[in-house]
Image: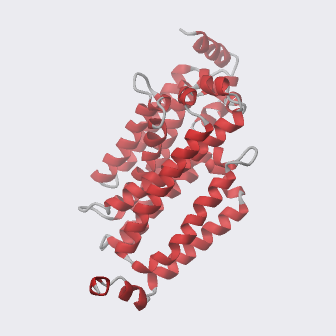
Amino acid sequence: MTTSEQKNTDGHKRGAGIAPYIHIARPDHWIKQLFILPGVVLGLLVGNVNMPLPPATRQIVLVLLATSLIASANYVINEWLDRDFDRFHPVKKHRPAVAQGLNPVVVYAEWATLSVLGMGTAWLVNVPCFVVVATLWVMGLLYNVKPIRTKDIPYLDVLSESLNNALRLLIGWFAIVVGTLPPTSAVIGYWMAGAYLMAIKRFSEYRAIGDPKTAGLYRKSFARYTERSLLDSSLFYAMFSVFLLGVFLVKWHIEYVIAMPFLCGLYVMYFNLAFQKDSAVQAPEKLYHERRLMLYVVFLIVLFAVLTVVSIPVLHTLSDVALIRM
């Protein structure tokens, strides 16, 4: 038994209680499953959905629950395996796996239980949802567990973790659409949007730690990152995601082109948040505290909703192939 495990076992014997085990499952992070809903909307817009409302609602509720349970399983294994690294982070050093005694047997039992419950719930929906939810679970292992542990590899850490964003889009799609795949441009664009969010989070964390050596002890990938390289990568992900999302939006409903400048504005607003002290981008589940950002997101949702139901003939005329050839 390692020193860390011995400390955690001793701490458990002193009576850690159930609260730390609930905490490491991070139920407060379940709000991130809202990233599934754009997949549902995508299915409604282009998936030719014929499912009645009650079954569709049941499917959506089940995939939200299944994904939340699998996400919690991934969080449990993440906090447990990261406990020796998190002690070098100014905030994460207070996590239960670091600061309190946890029993490894209970931790692994919790991870296994959440995994089985999540997989079982996804199976109740349909096979495609089960496959994607299982992939989300596998990505948690690849991200956290040696010998691969992608979170220790520069750039791959961001790309592998943000792939979960695309998986959530697919889960939302398959909740109501079976037999067809969503547009590739939308899936990859959503993935790159997640990579942008993750790279900005990494930049804010790196900047907050303030010391490259300590940052490298906290996260191995940070030993090969700099503030400049993190910003450069975030710019690449932002441009790539906007390009791909633009391709999808204009292809399927050209009126969405009006919203593109405002979507770019959201990226800029999020970028500026990274420079704030104790920035909310380090804990995206708390972004709802950023009132200006939330109001802007609501504005974007309303704008997209309006553009969905309107037709602007001049935009169709300007995109006409015959006109372009003239």
The residue drawn where x is 42% and y is 90% is 314
Number of labels in the image equals 0
The residue drawn where x is 62% and y is 47% is 28
Note whether residue 52 is visible: no
* Vertical side of 158 occupied by 304: above or below: below
Residue lying at the far left of the rendered structure: 179
Please state, as top left, top right, bottom left or bottom right, where the C terminus lies in the image. Answer: bottom left
Spot occupied by residue 112 in the image (x, y as percentages of width and height): 44, 31
Note whether residue 179 is visible: yes
Spot occupied by residue 93 in the image (x, y as percentages of width and height): 69, 27
Q: Looking at this view, is 63 or 306 the one in front?
A: 306
Residue lying at the far bottom of the rendered structure: 313
Q: Looking at this view, is 69 or 165 the one in front?
A: 165
Is 91 placed left or right of 304 in the picture? Answer: right
Spot occupied by residue 92 in the image (x, y as percentages of width and height): 67, 32
* Vertical side of 99 occupied by 140: above or below: below
* Vertical side of 183 occupied by 27: above or below: above
Is 179 placed left or right of 15 in the picture? Answer: left
Q: Looking at this view, is 279 or 8 the one in front?
A: 279
Spot occupied by residue 191 in the image (x, y as percentages of width and height): 43, 52
Image quadrant assignment for residue 208: top right
* Vertical side of 160 occupied by 98: above or below: above
Q: How is the image coloured?
A: secondary structure
Residue lying at the far right of the rendered structure: 277
The residue drawn where x is 54% and y is 48% is 234
The residue drawn where x is 38% and y is 67% is 247
